[in-house]
Image (tube, rainbow, N blue to C red):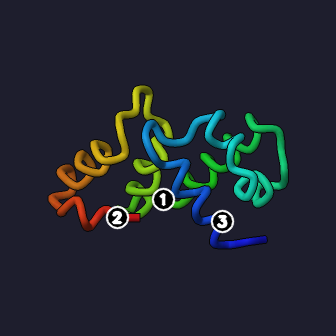
Amino acid sequence: MDLERLRDNLKYIRRGRGLTFAKLAECPYVMEALGDLPVRLAYEQLAEMVRTLGEDVQAMALRNAYAIDMPAPDTLTRRRERIAGIHGLSIDTIEL
């Protein structure tokens, strides 16, 4: 597996509205890492992996970056600004 391309796929997914079925389907390295499951199952598996990380600031920032469990996600920049404000941090602190 090409880890650099996997990282690039993961960065791509967090842009804009975050994790979506369509974006995930466009990311072959993430799909491979998830076992080449059907997109819906891969989506749920990735979301659940992130959810299990807990409730600390880094875990919340990652859920926020991928817009997991957000009914109406905004852009990545706005999501970062919101979580930074909630925790009294600089937006640069919430960089993934």
Q: Earlier in the sequence, mark 3 or mark 2?
A: 3
**Marking on residue 5:** 3
The x, y position of residue 83, in whole percent, is: 27, 50
Residue nearest the observer in this picture, 69 or 67: 67
At x 75%, y 38%, the residue is 39
Residue 19 x %, y %: 55, 41
Q: What kind of residue is marked 3?
A: Arg
Q: Residue furthest top?
A: 72
Residue 54 badge: 1
Task: Give the label, 3 or 2, closer to the camera.
Answer: 3
Residue 31: x percent and y percent? 76, 51
Residue 3: give its label. Answer: none
The residue that disc 2 covers is 95
Q: Secondary structure at mark 1?
A: loop
First-in-chain label (3 vs 1) = 3
- Is disc 1 surrounded by few (<14), some (14 to 19) or many (20+) residues within 10 Å? few
Marks 1 and 2, Cα distance to the nearest angstrom?
18 Å
Dot 3: few (<14), some (14–19), or many (≥20) neighbours within 10 Å?
A: some
> Which residue sits at x=63%, y=72%?
4
The reply to whether callout 3 and callout 2 are in contact (CB within 8 Å) is: no
Q: Amino acid at mark 2?
A: Glu
Residue placed at 80% from the left, 57% from the top? 32
Q: Earlier in the sequence, mark 1 or mark 2?
A: 1
Question: At numbered mark 3, what does the secondary structure look like: helix, strand or loop?
Answer: helix
Circle 2 packing at 10 Å, graded few (<14), some (14-19), many (20+), is few
User: What's the distance in space between the residues labelled 3 and 2, CA to CA?
Assistant: 19 Å
- Whether residue 11 sits left or right of residue 80 in the image: it is right
Residue 67, picture quadrant: top left
Identify the residue at horizontal 48%, vertical 42% (top origin): 18
The quarter in which the C terminus is drawn is bottom left
Viewer-nearest of discs 1 and 2: 2
